[in-house]
Image (cartoon, helix red, strand yellow):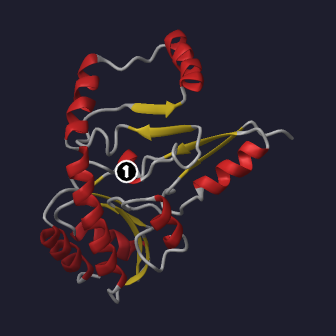
Amino acid sequence: MQVTLFFTESPTNPFLRCVDIELVSKLCHDKGALVCIDGTFATPLNQKALSLGADIVLHSATKYIGGHNDVIAGCISGSEKLISVVRNLHHILGGLLNPNAAYLIIRGMKTLHLRVQQQNSTGLRMAKVLEAHPKVNRVYYPGLPSHPEHQLAKRQMTGFGGVVSFEVDGDLLKTAKFVDALKIPYIAPSFGGCESIVDQPAIMSYCFGVEDFEDLKADVLQALATI
């Protein structure tokens, strides 16, 4: 079997595992394969996958880049040779971004640095709060020393994002009770916007927005106190 393309996301959803992009790129290039990284969870500010050796980088602009949960879009980056092929197919197949959506993306990019900076800070601080709480069994966040790829994340990322995944000490009903007790976040399967969002797959996934850290901390602690 001949592999022509290796595709992965880093960090991954929902456990936020990190791929050694530099190592993977070298191994794949030695075999003649391209490397495509979905860097949505990292944001284009926290991780420069192209500089680490990847050939193509994808981002869901719906998330951090748009930043306001009001637009659906995506973007792809890479060499002119590779992206020109994608661009030609894009013109043939259609699916162009409408002008208003493009405007919303441009608007979001103007505050991307400020938002990501705040979300990096809140995400790390809340991950530490959660990890120390007796009603939380495990926290998944690349910024924590307990994360299996913490050293790798520190090497290839400048920040760790606003998404924190964790397991509360209890069954599905207790987890649902915790979610229902939260007052600040919206319950929705998304992340990266100004508003905090919580989602409940097999584990808890919480994307912290740009709200005040102390408000978010107090809300999480009062919700944990209900279970």
Q: Residue at x 36, y 76 (%)?
A: 174
Q: Position of residue 190 (x, y in %)?
A: 35, 49
Q: Which residue is drawn at 49% across and 74% down?
A: 147
Q: In which quarter of the image is residue 209?
A: bottom left
Question: In the shown orientation, is residue 13 left or right of residue 81?
Answer: left
Question: Which residue in the rendered view is the most extreme toward the top?
Answer: 92
Amino acid at the residue labelled 1: Pro
Q: Which residue is drawn at 19% across and 79% down?
A: 222
Q: Can residue 202 be seen in this view?
A: no
Within 10 Å of disc 1 (Cα), the crowding (few <14, some 14-19, many 20+) is few
Q: Where is residue 204 in the image (x, y as percent from the top left)?
A: 40, 67
Q: Is residue 143 visible?
A: yes
Q: In this view, does 167 lie above or below 115?
A: below
Q: In this view, does 24 lie above or below 32?
A: below
Question: In the shown orientation, is residue 131 left or right of residue 129?
Answer: right
Number of numbered markers: 1
Q: Which residue is drawn at 23% across and 21% down?
A: 100
Q: Where is residue 56 in the image (x, y as percent from the top left)?
A: 56, 36
- State the residue position of label 1: 189
Quadrant where the image shows the N terminus: top right
Label 1: which secondary element: loop
Quadrant where the image shows the C terminus: bottom left
Q: In which quarter of the image is residue 103?
A: top left
Question: In the shown orientation, is residue 148 left or right of residue 138?
Answer: right
